[in-house]
Amino acid sequence: MTVGQGPAARRRFATLGRSVALFRAFLVEQTDPDHFYGLLADDSVRQVSGYTGLTGRTVLDVGGGPGYFAQAFRAAGARYVGLDPDVGDFSAAESSAGMLRGSGTALPVRSGSVDICFSSNVLEHVSEPHRMLDEMARVTKPGGVLFVSFTPWLSPWGGHETAPWHYLGGQRARRRYERRNGRPPKNRFRETLFPVSIADALRWARGNPEVQVLDALPRYHPWWGRWIVRVPGVREIGSWNFLLVLRRTGERPEVAGQAEKVGLTGGRVQM
């Protein structure tokens, strides 16, 4: 697989100015989603490009949503296929060409079919995050790259729109939101939002011989803020959003009796 731009380029990319722009955009996520998600998609493509080439590569986006990431990856030369998991709000995304419907914990894709398996802020929305990580590793070709980011539960935004009251308990934060707004939150604790930790994700990655950890970092921080991931406890709060970059190491046999999957070839879905 073509290598990315390397550590020096990744440092030049991860500037303080970039971090400020992302956090400012984050403040208008609800009122100006086109700006926020468009900026995040472009930023994500640049970040992925720091680890692997994209031109001609097949990218599976687990939790692709309504199309911001599709446009950005295709503009970078990738063959993009998005998957809309049947969990929470993601199931409401509009279908489009190159999109699959399915669950992130049971990807309808053949083993070893994609060069890059990407997921942005979906892991905290599935009840079995390890199963989703296992599935992402399964569908990635040996030598391919997994790019997974999520919001840790103890992050200041861990409770999403119920934050920061989630620090007093997810159910309490949910009830408070309902009292104040007259409706339940979009991200409902233990239904569409689950407590995921950086420590748990790192344990999964380091204990799984099918993947090699290439990088682990706070996704939106400048390069000099990476140290925070090395400090247990502090990283759960201070990382805000955690990024895990992995390389798929070897073949994985199909499970007997496994349901038929679709293959991704040349950027098209084939049965």
Image (cartoon, rainbow, N blue to C red):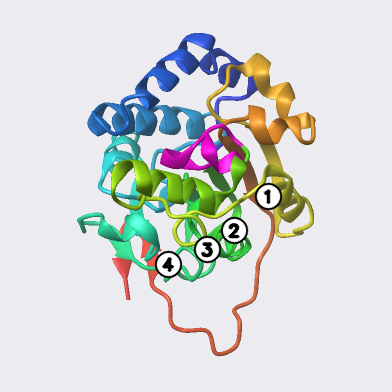
Residue 153 visible somewhere in the drawing: no
Name the residue located 50 percent from the left edge and 45 percent from the top edge.
173
Disc nearer the start of the sequence (2/4): 4
Q: Report the magenta residues as a range.
A: 155-167
Disc nearer the start of the sequence (4/3): 4
- Determine whether 60 is above or below 112 in the image: above
Name the residue located 60 percent from the left edge and 37 percent from the top edge.
242
Residue 262 numbered tag: none
Disc nearer the start of the sequence (1/4): 4
Q: Is residue 99 left or right of residue 165?
A: left
Disc nearer the start of the sequence (1/3): 3
Q: How busy is the neighbourhood of tag 4: few (under 14 within 10 Å), some, or many (20 plus)?
A: some
- Residue at the far front in the pictured view: 179
Q: Is residue 41 left or right of residue 221?
A: left
Q: Quadrant of residue 214?
A: top right
Q: Quadrant of the N terminus?
A: top right
Q: How busy is the neighbourhood of tag 1: few (under 14 within 10 Å), some, or many (20 plus)?
A: many
The secondary element bearing badge 4 is classed as: loop
Label 2, on which residue? 133
Label 4, on which residue? 103
Check if mark 1's residue and mark 3's residue have beta carbons within 8 Å. no
Check if mark 2's residue and mark 1's residue have beta carbons within 8 Å. yes
**Coordinates of residue 149 in the picture (x, y in percent):** 54, 42
Check if mark 1's residue and mark 4's residue have beta carbons within 8 Å. no
Label 1, on which residue? 201
